[in-house]
Image: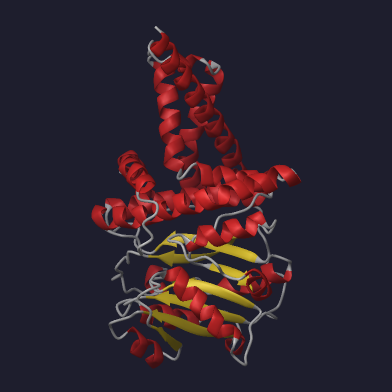
Amino acid sequence: MMLKEIIEGLFIGFSTTAGLISTYQTLVSCGGLFRKKEAVTNEPTKTFAVLVAAHNESAVIAPLIENLKKLDYPREMYDIFVICDNCTDNTAEIVREHGAYACERFDSSKRGKGFGIEWMLENLWGMPKQYDAIVMFDADNLVEKNFLRVMNDRLCKGARVIQGYLDSKNPFDSWITLSYAITYWFTNRMWQLARHNLGLPNTLGGTGLCIDSALLKEMGWGATSLTEDLEFATRCIARGIYPTWAHDTKVYDEKPIDLKASMRQRLRWMQGHYDVAGRYIGTVLKNGFKSMRLGMLDAAFYLFQPMYVLIVTFMSILFATRFFDVGFMPAAHFLPSWLVYSTTAVFYLLPVLALYLEKVPLKAYFGLLLLPIFFLTWLPIFFYAFFTKNNQEWSHTAHTRSIRLEEMQ
């Protein structure tokens, strides 16, 4: 009897916590239902160093450089530097042929994007020409032509760390790429834009971001984990500097086509997430409570729950135990019925609304039917990543989708 009561008590605590977290995230997501157009009102005044992280990217680097050279921004006000990081192919040759700076780095002891960026920034600070801001892309990206215009405007208005809209270059290549795309479309609208509208800090996505150079020199890059974007964003938030969101300019990247490559990429993300959460969540929570800033507590919430799919799983369990009246799980009855039902309804409606509001192609909606399967593939990743979070070996995702922005449009 005692054991049964202990199990029921633990489940009550677990499900109640899950329900409250789910309710909080659902309410915050509703902030993405509206969008205020942010007009670009400032003429180009900022100079940019555009950094492109590349490791054996000869198949995709040329279209990106051509794309970057045609941005709607004075060409003399930005330079393109490609970090050819431990490349064994002809990436550097292609970069030079297309008129960008090929910065070759060979260091087998410090492998990974974070180390490459740190090395590049150290070299950049020592150059005669200095830049107002640093922009970062991955080699497989394509960029909307207004990108630097938008970043210049945000910097002029006081932003110091800005994340652009992340979209998919190949959403309909497979059910995996479509699942990725739907996840990104939803996240862009109901996580990123929602938090931007509510004055909460945004997360960084590893590419399509802009950082004020003075801030980088002040605090250093210092982000060499498997998720360097999350690490740098968390360090900024802990200092009270909130990354912000630019919904009006897009960066497209290539998503893995097959499940094996996808799981390998997501495993790296989760190992990095657990690592960063373990090292920074205490500081963020402490600073948040000390300064009574909701933004810091919200960032800690993101570090605490590794991915949105966990909330989906929790909500599904709560709803199922209530709807099917599972007697051996009394925790489902601990929360009021109206809260479970209403939150669940809104929770599952939001992805559909996100696709509608983002005006995605009609055929993308069919991906919602496959999304639960994609969510299930996250579960073994969560568990395996937790027990291997100390593994910081970088795994490269191969890119082959060599298309141009004009073809996509």
In this figure, which colouring scheme has been used for the structure?
Answer: secondary structure
Left/right of residue 313 with respect to residue 256 in the rendered view: right
Front in this rendered view, residue 289 or 357: 289
Residue 164 position (above or below residue 213): above
Residue located 63% across and 49% down the image: 284
Image-based side of 117 in relation to 181, left or right: right
Quarter occupied by residue 91: bottom left
Which residue is located at x 39 percent, y 87 percent? 95
Residue 32 in view in this figure = no
What residue sits 69% from the left and 50% below the top?
Answer: 199
Residue extending furthest top? Answer: 1
Q: Nearer the viewer, residue 405 or 297?
A: 297
Q: With respect to residue 33, does 236 lie above or below? A: below
Residue 38 location, x and y as percent?
67, 61
Task: Tell me the residue at 49%/14% (across/down).
Answer: 333
Q: Position of residue 109 (x, y in %)?
A: 37, 74
Position of 133 compared to 190: left or right? right
Residue 150, quarter of the rendered image = bottom right
Q: Nearer the viewer, residue 233 or 161?
A: 233
